[in-house]
Amino acid sequence: MATGGGGGGGGGGAAGSAGNADHHKRNTFTSYVAPLPGDLRATADTNEWCLPSDMRDVHLAKPRLLQGEQIAASAPAYMYSPIDPMDSSGNPTTSGSSSSASADGGNHKEATFGLLSVTNFKLAFVPLHAKRNPAAPLVDLYQENAYLGRNEITLNNIDHIYTIAELGRAASALQAARGMASNNSSRRKKLEPFKQHNISGRIAALHIVCKNFRLLKFSFQQQDSKVFGASDQGKLIASALVRFAYPMRHDLSFAYAHKEPYYSTLGASGTSMYATKNDWARELIRCGATEWQVVSSASVQLLQNPLQAGKYTVPPHFVIPKSCSVDRFLDLSRAFCDSRAAFWVYSYGNSAALVRLAELQPAAQQDTKSENVMLELVRKCDAERQLRLLQLTDRLPSIQDVLRSYQKLRRLCTPETPEKFMLQDDKYLGLLEKTNWLFYVSLCLRYASEAAATLRGGVTCVLQESNGRDLCCVISSLTQILLDPHFRTIDGFQSLVQKEWVALEHPFQRRLGHVYPALPAGGNAELQESEQSPVFLLFLDCVWQLLQQFTDEFEFTQTYLTTLWDACFMPIFDTFQFDTQAQRVKAVRDLHLVLRPVWDWGEQFSDKDKMFFSNPLYQRQRGDLGAQAAAAAHRRSLAVGNKVVHGTASGSTPSRNTINPQLFSTASSVPQDRFLQPAFRIFDLQVWDQCYYRWLPVLDIRGGSQPQVDLFHRLLLSNIAKVQRCLEFQNFDDLPDAYYEATGESRPNQSKDERPEKEDEAEFVDGVERRKKTTTTKAGTPTNGLNSVSGNLQLSTLSSFFPFGNPIAGDAPHQLYDILNSSSELLMETSSFLDKSSIV
């Protein structure tokens, strides 16, 4: 019967095409088969959204599913750009009349037709019959995630969902998607996560605002219910999103359904997970902190008592003053919020320590005896008996202030219409100032600089905050980055995040909004939502500011930082999914959760993506490495997983024996002359354009911004490395072609008689020459890669937000990756022996 129906549908399609070639009607009973001849619905003029014949096989556009992933809802839809691209005159492009745009999918110049699906992991849009430009490369350099496509987002990434009610059959779906109707405010409705929604009315479009500053806009078919029956595609998708994007329990996350085994490759990495007592002991040895001791909760009898353990919320491992017994420390900690008494995190110089401390609980604030005793215990650990208390609560914004600032910044970076974009553009600086985001970044850098200066002066610094788990993480991490060059490497930075944010339990689950618990009777939704706050993004922005001011001091790039922010919303990786270590242990024990650290970047990205995590200008000093590691660092690989293991920051594989710091040298191995002193005034700061603006094509400057500069730096460094190698071996036959183009000389091993009438063109990327046959082109015509045109090097045109954003044909050819990949070894030699004077 199915076969016969298909044949009849095919015949009906042939007959119907004779009468109406552009508007083939679909029989809803058979879904994707054309209606039979004579069907009244085939000539009904009440259906304003008739699909052309090449769109009937929308059911073939299915998303790629992971193990344990299931589709909850699917619907054909049009996906629109966040705002319309501008033409050369600066005016937004249009797509013709509303009626034609609504009735014929071929006239949706601004939209892409495909299948929109909601799964228990992501929102996926699969374009139907995506047309590839023949000039576009088969492979480009834009970042590709192994778990997510370019038109897919995780449900954890969704922050706000807005529905646009149907205007009526005479209105345009394009108008609904763009949200430009005059009565848009009355039709646009936000779906609140804390409420049970009874979605009423027909939904013409959806606007989805993501936590990583992405805005997605979809419009749906507007079908006549009298003719086609009730099939509200928009309501189907919206209902599925509200159900799966706002889970009320953490065990509803996709991570619990994804049971694919994980095989770690972090053994060769220098990232310390701070998951064992030995990890903390190694850090004590590295910092020369002899007056402190590591405590494991599993070895404390009081914390193992079920009747007493509930009174404390301490992490599995923490460092306390050696002069204080564990029982006394725990007794004093009960007076502090979340039991966060003085926890050691870092030491600099002889004995100056960086300590994190929570404030007293409200009931104990009248009696400061416990706080004074705790501070005196910390003072005894300082050789000079000096201490400075840096109160952060009164100096830095609250988590609610950070949330409001972030929301204002995101509204500025996600305009919904060209009109709104132009209005914001005219008042951009004023609107940016009103967000207070750069002001908060400035404050964090300022007090981190003060804390670093205090430690350099040999004075212990105590950072105090309400619960010691939010802004304390920001200031403490920034202080260590300013003082210690180890934390400016990729492995060191990852170890720092593990220590300050994961091991000491920053509440990622609440701050990033991974769970939306049901409100009790009479509960306040605003109070519950105030628990959310992107404190970690504030920290990453501060690090990005340092990266702009001290480019050659950091091994990682802004691409690495942007990718790290995106990784916060990947539920497959547990690093940023829990509030405490106890939650993580319970999930593994009771629900058999498979733990995957986000630092195993090979799980998500290929080598070509990880290649752009490394900074070509980074200079690792020989003093930073041990004797055995120095030789290996001379030829280290660009792949993140093959970094040299730092002498004291090894992996977190548990050891049979516990390390005793007292048996090792007491001298600190932290260099004292590699500290940074950043500028922290607001006019010294910039907007992190790659992270905040990458989803706005209108702001893309082809061949501009930092990615183009980085590509040119790679070229210069590789050419310098070639010249230095020629000088070292006194063999000048392998000089880069850039030398001969600049001097006009010919290669010594090529005589004039042997020279062809016209030399083959040479592509230059990172100093590596790729010869190819020339074709007749006009002078100055740009081609792929790095080309020599009229004696001048022409760089390949990259996006301002490379490797993010939407690629344009020819701007990142696959030959460029081949050249970069083949020259990676040469680049790493440059990073090892090239001194800074060579590139000044």
Image: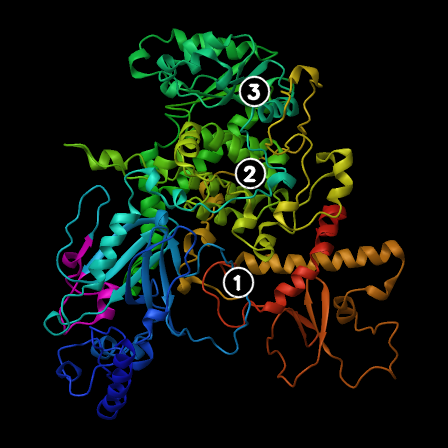
Residue at left 32%, top 63%?
116
CA separation, marks 3 and 1? 44 Å
Q: Which mark is residue 353?
A: 3
Residue at left 48%, top 64%?
701
Q: In the rendered structure, are the residues bearing label 1 and label 2 in contact, judged by CB atoms less than 8 Å apart?
A: no
Looking at the image, is mark 3 or mark 2 nearer the viewer? 2
Which is nearer the eye, 255 or 80? Answer: 255
Expressed as whole percent of the image width and height from the top left, the position of residue 682 reads 44, 42
- Secondary structure under tag 2 reads helix
Compared with residue 103, is residue 285 higher up or lower down, i.e. above or below? above
**Left or right: 250 with respect to 170?**
right
- Secondary structure under tag 1 reads loop
Residue 199, by quadrant, is bottom left
> Magenta segment: does it hold 561?
no
Location of the N terminus by quadrant is bottom left
Q: Which mark is residue 494?
A: 2
**Left or right: 792 with respect to 152?**
right
Label 2 Cα neighbours within 10 Å, binned few <14 / some 14-19 / many ≥20:
some
Residue tagged by mark 1? Answer: 704
Looking at the image, is mark 3 or mark 1 nearer the viewer? 3
For this orientation, the residue located farthest to the left is 226
For the record, the magenta segment spans 165-189
CA separation, marks 1 and 2? 30 Å
Which is nearer the eye, 262 or 183? Answer: 262
| Amino acid, disc 3 | Ala
Label 1 Cα neighbours within 10 Å, binned few <14 / some 14-19 / many ≥20:
some
| Amino acid, disc 2 | Gln
Residue 76, by quadrant, is bottom left
Q: Return the disc, 3 or 1, that comes first in the chain's sequence.
A: 3
Q: Return the disc, 1 or 2, that comes first in the chain's sequence.
A: 2
